[in-house]
Amino acid sequence: MHRTQRENSYSSERGAYYPAQDVNLHTHCYYCRHGSGEVSDYIRIAKERGLKVLGMSDHAPVPDGRWPLSRMTMSELPSYFADVIQGQQDQGMIVLRAMECDYLPEYHGYYQQELLGTWGCDYLVGSVHTVDMPYAKDVNLHQSPLSKAELVQYAKQYIDMLSSGLFLFGAHPDVFGCSYLTWDKEAEACSRAILEAAVELRIPLEINGNGFRRAKVAGCNGPKTPYPIVEFWNLAAQYDVMVMTNSDAHVPKDVDASFTDSSALAATCGLSFAGLRLSERDAAAKVTLSYETSPKQTLAGPVSSKGFTKELPAIIQPAFV
Ligand SMILES: [Zn+2]
Ligand SMILES: [Zn+2]
């Protein structure tokens, strides 16, 4: 749903505005098996560091047990949400209930009905960490050298995720830089397709702080961060795209990490971060979240329900698909 001018003029009624440096909506913990620390540890340190809004968003399990090495089991969902709710009650700061979800159409109903419905998540983080090819399921973007065909599939799955209407923002859209090390015409075309979808659907994209803390990869001009990819965000500056940032913490001390690096990259590329507009909880304990480029201007709604059907650029279709 797009915001209207009338809604803009009543912005103060939609809740408080939090600038990017006061917010982290992408946070993991020990449940995902590759993070550490209790939910309460993240909340405590977030408060000590002066964050105003913390979203706990550990990796979502799926009913068929896919990706078991990097996420909690379905049976751990009650305990995870109980920890987050406990933190909301005890710690005196704004803590939001969320999960980071690998989007595939077969999980759409589960994410919508169970995570947003039954479990009452305040928002979901949309991600793509693996791609499905005819010859291999779950090609891991963090581990495999990515082929051009796999890069195209990544862009398709990422655009499907944005188009689903389930997610508050798209996480690390340039994570393909872990395993696709060159910035060539295919990388640019796939990036443009993702950016165009984000603009059309009015969904913010994330400069992900965790990429700054990862081991460097071999770029054309020497070692570089796997992501964020500077060329991607330079390209983003050509679009009317909403950009936000999160630490993507996997250990408590990183709960506010890498904001300086993300800010420097954004400034280099001529981008500025959107802030978060967050309502009070209503009688049904629901909050409304939206992103704004400034306290007075709303450019993105909470979640778009509009489909996006744009094909990937023709430049990469004939040769690689
Ligand atoms: Zn992720
Ligand atoms: Zn994450």
Image (tube, rainbow, N blue to C red):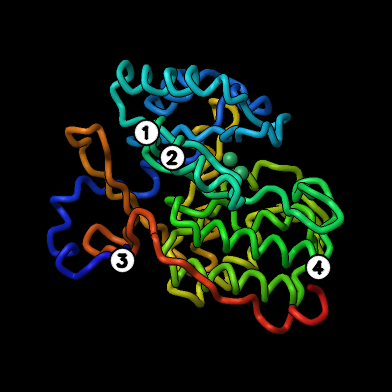
Q: Which residue type does callout 2 highlight? A: Gln
Residue 44 percent location from the top left of the image: 42, 20
Cα distance in 3D space between marks 4 and 3: 34 Å
Which of the two discs, 2 and 1, sits closer to the camera? Answer: 2
Q: Which residue type does callout 3 highlight? A: His
Q: Which residue is mark 1?
A: 120
Q: Which residue is mark 2?
A: 113
Instruction: Please indicate whether residue 100 sits to the left or right of residue 290 in the image.
Output: right
Which of the two discs, 2 and 3, sits closer to the camera? Answer: 2
- Of residue 75 and residue 173, the one placed in the foreground of this image is 75
In the image, residue 214 sits, relative to residue 225, either above or below, namely above
Residue 37 tag number: none
Mark 4 is surrounded, within 10 Å at the Cα level, by few (under 14), some (14 to 19) or many (20 or more) other residues, namely some
Q: Which residue is mark 4?
A: 148
Q: Which residue type does callout 4 highlight? A: Lys
Taking the image in four quarters, ligand 1 sits in the one at top right
What element does badge 2 sit on?
helix
Residue 109 percent location from the top left of the image: 50, 45
Instruction: Please indicate whether residue 295 sits to the left or right of residue 61 in the image.
Output: left
Cα distance in 3D space between marks 2 and 4: 35 Å
Q: Which residue type does callout 1 highlight? A: Gly
Which of the two discs, 4 and 1, sits closer to the camera? Answer: 1
Q: Which residue is mark 3?
A: 2
Residue 151 percent location from the top left of the image: 75, 64
In the image, residue 151 sits, relative to residue 140, either above or below, namely below
Mark 2 is surrounded, within 10 Å at the Cα level, by few (under 14), some (14 to 19) or many (20 or more) other residues, namely few
